[in-house]
Image (spheres, helix red, strand yellow):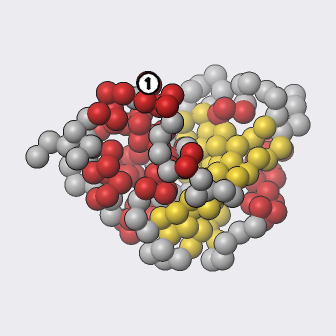
C-alpha cells in the first residue's frame, strides 16, 4: 500500500476534527499526522498538496469537499497563495470553511478556520464570511472570490499529471510492513 493511501484510509477523522484550531501553522498536515498511527512524514509536501487541492477531503472516508476556491485578482503575488476549502464531515454533520495562505515575503504557511456551519453554506454565505479577508488583501488590486462547487469532478479526486512529476518519490513511497 502506498503511504499516502495508508494515511487517507487510516486517519482518525473524529480526532482530526477536534485538532483543527481557529488558526494554525501549515496546511493541517501536522494535525493529520497526529491522527494516523506511525505516519511516514517523508510525504509532507504531497500531503500539503492533497489538502490545498481538496483531494484529501474526497479521499478520506466520512469527509467530502463541498467548495474549493481561490482569490483571483490578476496579482501573481497574491492569487496562488490563498486557497479556500469548505468540507463536510459525516461524523458531526457540519461544514467547515478553511482558508490556506502563504505569507508574501515570509513564506509562512497557515490555515484559518473561518466558520463552522450547521447546514451547507451557499456561495453567498461563504463570500460574506471571507469579505473582510478579501478586503484586507486588496492593497493594489480588486480581488474577487472564485468558488467551485463541482467538487465531485475528477480534478478533486486524484493528483494531476504535474503532481506526478513534482511528487514522484512521495507518490511511490510504499508503506513499510
Please say if 4 is above or below 151: above
Report which quarter residue 109 is drawn in. Answer: top right
The residue that label 1 is drawn on is: 165
Please say if 14 is above or below 6: below
Write the residue at 83% across / 39% down: 143
Left or right of 36 in this view: 25:
right
Q: Which residue lies furthest to the left in this view?
A: 177
Q: Is residue 107 visible?
A: yes
The front one of 45 and 100 is: 45
Report which quarter residue 96 is drawn in. Answer: bottom right
Write the residue at 22% across / 39% down: 174
The front one of 56 and 24 is: 56
Please say if 122 is above or below 100: below
- Residue 11, position in %: x, y? 33, 59
Secondary structure state at the residue bearing disc 1: helix
Write the residue at 47% across / 40% down: 159
Q: Is residue 98 visible?
A: no
Check disc 1: other Cα within 10 Å, few if <14, some if 14-19, many if 20+: few
- Residue 156, position in %: x, y? 55, 49
Left or right of 164 in this view: 77:
right
Amino acid at each position: 500500500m502506498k503511504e499516502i493511501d495508508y494515511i487517507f484510509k487510516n486517519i482518525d477523522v473524529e480526532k482530526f476534527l477536534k485538532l483543527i484550531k481557529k488558526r494554525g501553522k501549515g496546511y493541517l498536515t501536522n494535525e493529520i499526522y497526529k491522527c494516523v498511527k506511525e505516519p511516514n512524514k517523508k510525504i509532507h509536501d504531497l500531503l500539503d498538496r492533497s489538502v490545498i487541492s481538496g483531494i484529501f477531503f474526497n479521499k478520506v472516508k466520512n469527509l467530502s469537499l463541498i467548495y474549493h476556491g481561490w482569490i483571483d485578482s490578476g496579482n501573481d503575488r497574491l492569487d496562488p497563495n490563498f486557497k479556500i476549502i469548505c468540507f463536510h464531515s459525516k461524523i458531526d454533520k457540519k461544514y467547515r470553511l478553511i482558508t490556506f495562505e502563504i505569507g508574501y515575503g515570509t513564506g509562512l504557511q497557515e490555515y484559518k478556520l473561518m466558520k463552522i456551519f450547521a447546514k451547507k453554506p451557499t456561495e453567498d454565505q461563504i463570500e460574506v464570511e471571507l469579505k473582510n479577508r478579501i478586503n484586507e488583501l486588496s492593497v493594489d488590486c480588486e480581488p474577487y472570490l472564485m468558488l467551485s462547487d463541482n467538487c465531485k469532478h475528477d480534478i478533486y479526486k486524484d493528483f494531476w499529471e504535474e503532481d506526478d512529476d513534482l511528487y514522484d518519490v512521495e507518490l511511490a513511497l510504499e508503506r513499510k510492513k
